[in-house]
Amino acid sequence: MTAGRRGAAAPCYVCAVTTQRILFIGGTGVISSACARRVVEAGAELSVVNRGVTRSRPLPSEAHVLVADARDPSSIRDALGRAEFDSVVDFVAYTPDHVRADLELLRGKVGQYVFISSASAYQTPPARLPIVESTPLRNPYLRYSRDKIACEDVLVAAYREEGFPVTIVRPSHTYDRTSVPLTGGWTAVDRMRRGAPVVVHGDGTSLWTLTHHDDFARAFVPLLGERRAVGDSFHITSDEVLTWDEITRTLGAAAGAEPSIVHVPSEAIAVVDAEWGAGLLGDKAHSMVFDNHKVKSLVPGWAATIPFRVGAAEIVEWHDADPARRVLDPAFDAACERLVAAHPVPAGQAG
């Protein structure tokens, strides 16, 4: 596929999946929805455990829905019954107790268990770039990331001690048309459109990697049933690297606006909004560039082909199609106003 084109024919790497019975625990999230479509397109038999809630990312009609609470062992055991699966993917396991429950449920009953971890588990701030799978796992800032690391520890021990067939996959910042990849969501775009200054952390030059969920799915699905992936870990990200200023301007251009950028230190943002600050200091404030050679070695010819300028257009088009989707956050908007007031920029220099 030519870079920058959307919808052009892509090579198929999913042939090994076609004869599989696959179970997704969770299937309507940003990442899992694209993977569900890809599995069905490959001709595999897909079952999905969820609570029967319809979301903005509907499941493929071919998927068999098992209504259960994924975090209630008795509920999911009843839903599965005697069903057997070649590969099970848990998209909604976040704590060691979650994966321990999966171990109890699936031990000796599955050919491959795939745990969706997070690239935020990697050493933060990173000592070296690009990030590779052997980069140490350590994030003292985010509980979410530390919990993912703890999950990985449980699963690696199960593989080493009993041969439990785990594969660990670490997505980075993966998005779809429903998800604005700026803190504040649509509120940040709304500020651009009405000419209000947009806060960008640091000096706007730290490097970041955004991955379209369709690109992620094309690399992920071929790992299902791939024996060489068992006992190993992989991250899947785009190779396109952008600064946060570039991300902000690209989204603004898609929305028909020229953002007025005000740079604010991440530490100062944390004082005004602790949650926003934690996400920066524990993740987004640090340059994150990834080496994808490992996953490419198992999925020959795969490359992420959807640039963010295309993804940004999809995001704006989806939100503009329905006013109800353009949800605003008054608290975030107020936090931006306080930060802008505390960090004035000389006229003509903003952005």
Image: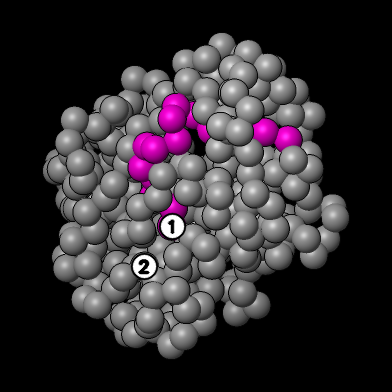
Classify 10 Å Cα crowding around label 2: few (below 14), some (14-19), many (20 and above).
many
Name the secondary structure under disc 2.
loop
Whether 210 is among the magenta residues is yes
Q: Which is nearer the eye, 243 or 286?
A: 243
Residues at marks 2 and 1 touching, judged by CB atoms closer than 8 Å:
yes
Q: Residue 293: horizontal and vertical position, in percent?
A: 18, 61
In the displayed structure, would residue 159 be above or below residue 113? Answer: above
Residue type, numbered disc 1? Thr
In the displayed structure, would residue 129 be above or below residue 81? Answer: above
> Residue at horizontal 44%, vertical 53%?
210
Q: Which mark is residue 87?
A: none
> Residue at horizontal 23%, vertical 62%?
295
Q: Which mark is residue 304?
A: 2
Name the secondary structure under disc 1.
strand
- Label located before the other in sequence (2 or 1): 1
Q: Which is nearer the eye, 19 or 202?
A: 202
